[in-house]
Amino acid sequence: MRLSRYFLPILREVPKEAEIVSHRLMLRAGMIRQESAGIYAWLPFGLRVLNKVCNIIREEQNRAGAIEMLMPTIQSADLWRESGRYDDYGKEMLRIRDRHDREMLFGPTNEEMITEIVRAYVKSYKALPLNLYHIQWKFRDEVRPRFGVYRSREFLMKDAYSFDLDAAGARHSYNKMFVAYLRTFARMGLKAIPMVADTGPIGGNLSHEFIILASTGESEVFCHGDYLDMAPPPADVNFDDPAGLQSVFDRWTQLYAATSEKHDTAAFDAIPEDRRLAARGIEVGHIFYFGTKYSEPFGAKVLGPDGKEHTIHMGSYGIGPSRLVAAMIEASHDENGIIWPDAVAPFQVGILNLKVGDSATEAACGALYAELTAAGYDVLYDDTEERAGAKFATADLIGLPWQILVGPKSLAEGKVELKRRVDGSRELIAPSDIVERLKA
Amino acid sequence: MRLSRYFLPILREVPKEAEIVSHRLMLRAGMIRQESAGIYAWLPFGLRVLNKVCNIIREEQNRAGAIEMLMPTIQSADLWRESGRYDDYGKEMLRIRDRHDREMLFGPTNEEMITEIVRAYVKSYKALPLNLYHIQWKFRDEVRPRFGVYRSREFLMKDAYSFDLDAAGARHSYNKMFVAYLRTFARMGLKAIPMVADTGPIGGNLSHEFIILASTGESEVFCHGDYLDMAPPPADVNFDDPAGLQSVFDRWTQLYAATSEKHDTAAFDAIPEDRRLAARGIEVGHIFYFGTKYSEPFGAKVLGPDGKEHTIHMGSYGIGPSRLVAAMIEASHDENGIIWPDAVAPFQVGILNLKVGDSATEAACGALYAELTAAGYDVLYDDTEERAGAKFATADLIGLPWQILVGPKSLAEGKVELKRRVDGSRELIAPSDIVERLKA
């Protein structure tokens, strides 16, 4: 993409209304714009990150055998009366009356709807196990939305729902998502630590939050420091092997890790002192096993191999991609701006023409742009008339992992400068060696 | 995808509530499920088609220089008061009050919001031309939603908005979208004919509808038969060439084509009799140039090269992907089910194991599945225990373009049967020749 043809409204000023760094940087980098309290438009640069995050989530959900579908945003109140949550949910639910005065709502989550769908179609244990997910906008009418997309009212959520014949099957489904989540966050460059969690309004008796450490996190967390060195399960992990997945789960939960709500001082103190980690954390995922809490009132049953009716066992599994974008910035930035992990960078490479109008730099930039694009890289080519200093500042603010600085001086010696955003290191390199270098 | 692990709830019965063929077939093929009047969940098979449709739209929007972003579903009423449309819009607008009693609405379209965004950031003609689009769920509270996703209340829309310094620039932007739409529909296997249209509540004085012919279409249309033979503009059409695009526009609008609202009997009668086409049509896209209708009340202005302020000229450009899926089925089906064009088929190839449990057919199916998947095809492998007849019926109902029938008899001779959905033709072929054959 040529920057001169793109829409990247950078703010040079620090926006006053933004209290946390991710909110400030997302506004300054032209990623989002507030439309109403807690409701944001994703500008082109922000949407690119959001889409990359969603695609990683999607790939790992699919790998674990979950199947994507898409439920609507607007739901009927009657559906929520079946579970009894319509009155329970309180003012966070955005309630709506349509032109025929029917009571509707903007879905804050989808346990009810998916249970109704599975009840309608699934009659036999042979159709199980089943895990259906969607990535759809949700609405929770927070009384004080703040921190940008970190705590917004309209937000994107990936929510998966598993359906099994019995508790043992449901446990295996839970472990599949547990492993998928470890892989998902690791691929985004995040060290997410699973912690035993309260189940809250979703219900159930087995639940984990996935927490990343960040100084601006909202929760106080306590864990064993070894978590930071653990490698995520490999891509070829066998999701059809219940014992194998259980052992991954056991390995990732044997060390102490808890949020302040579930904190056990004695257990924490039992950790060798140099491995104790007390820090602030951000919740980036939450998984639940809640048995028959929804299938029971909805009458979602299957015929089992024994010829009898069995109420389906369920779990649900959520990640908020819009919130995750903010969380990644909280975890990865410096005083100059965002530092994107390669896997989610909206553009992996920036080309900065440091002297627009100079035929040599323009030819070199044009050739690099064509070559890198052909090699499959997402490239942002700064061909604007801004001065060099402003281009450096923009490239660092928006966090391009690799920046190619093309100026007449080094070009006269057949070189360009390749800068790594993460540490600011620079090297002189021949343009023809760039693709090879990026691959390495 | 192995069918035994997929969620494809086929209905053998014809659903009584469905009045038109696309609605019947989408329900029967397990593509959608009604959640409330005019509100649908997209089941996995349906979502695959919807995504393919969106990706074609996206590629052609990007090719024409439009930039993707994503606006929220919920908008503030105040925004619509600025344009004066809040009171005008009537009962089709889903109006909402949040917990603080602020007036909100579920966006039926986004002229107001995008104008406000561009007003906030764009100050100079140098940032123009600009075309921003998004693909987002909209809501129109139709009094009688019907025909499934063909006329639903919650529906997906791609809406693009162009911004130019003057009317001449806006005309070029209009032509870009005109050409992009011709290519978009052609890639989906549709012959879409541009027809002069009323502008309705969007406003403006230049507008075209893109209409495909289908016997169940809602509009009566009249056009020159030569439209059906015209080739769409090529992929390398130069979108930066105003005169070139204008000539494409002229070529596609010089022949007579009009909906009944705009019908001119005399002009139609001037067409040679054997080239007159009077038929029913379905609107699949609608484009508008409306000048300063929104930028004027919003005060969206830029400094021109003359140092003076100029009110921005705008257009908007809509395609409904969810509706388009239904329209494609209306245009392409037979008594056995859907006939997907290759470009949007949810799976391009089906493999039907006609004797599950037979080691030879299972080995052959497994090898074909691995080979075709590795070659980049989306494959649905029917490994279920259904009898052969039911598998044939399902593959035809859901419209798989290529079906590989793997039975013990032909396999004993080293062959499988390759069936083409569109004409039912079959050929015996060695499994090792399948990929080569599909590529040809």
Image (cartoon, coloured by chain):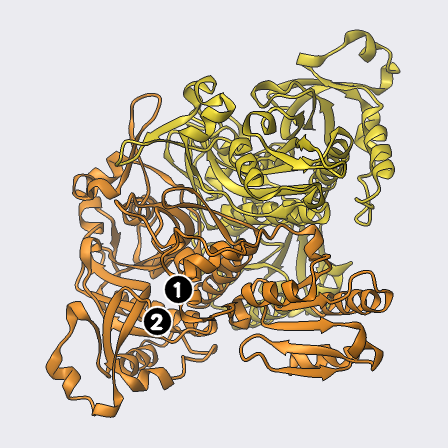
Chain colours: A orange, B yellow
* Residue on which the image places disc 1: A327
Q: Residue at x 86, y 30 (%)?
A: B251
Q: Nearer the viewer, residue B78 or A194?
A: B78
Image x and y of residue B359, in percent: 52, 73
As drawn, is B103 to the left or to the right of B232? left
Q: Is residue A132 above or below residue B109?
A: below
| Secondary structure type for disc 1 | helix
As drawn, is A267 to the left or to the right of A55? left
* Residue on which the image places disc 2: A214
Image x and y of residue A4, in percent: 71, 53
Task: Check contact, mark 2 vs mark 1: CB within 8 A.
Answer: yes
Image x and y of residue B385, in percent: 44, 59
Q: Residue at x 65, y 47 (%)?
A: B56
Q: Callout 1, which amino acid?
A: Ala
As drawn, is A268 to the left or to the right of B27? left
Q: Nearer the viewer, residue A126 or A249?
A: A249
| Secondary structure type for disc 2 | loop
Q: Is residue A19 above or below residue B316?
A: below
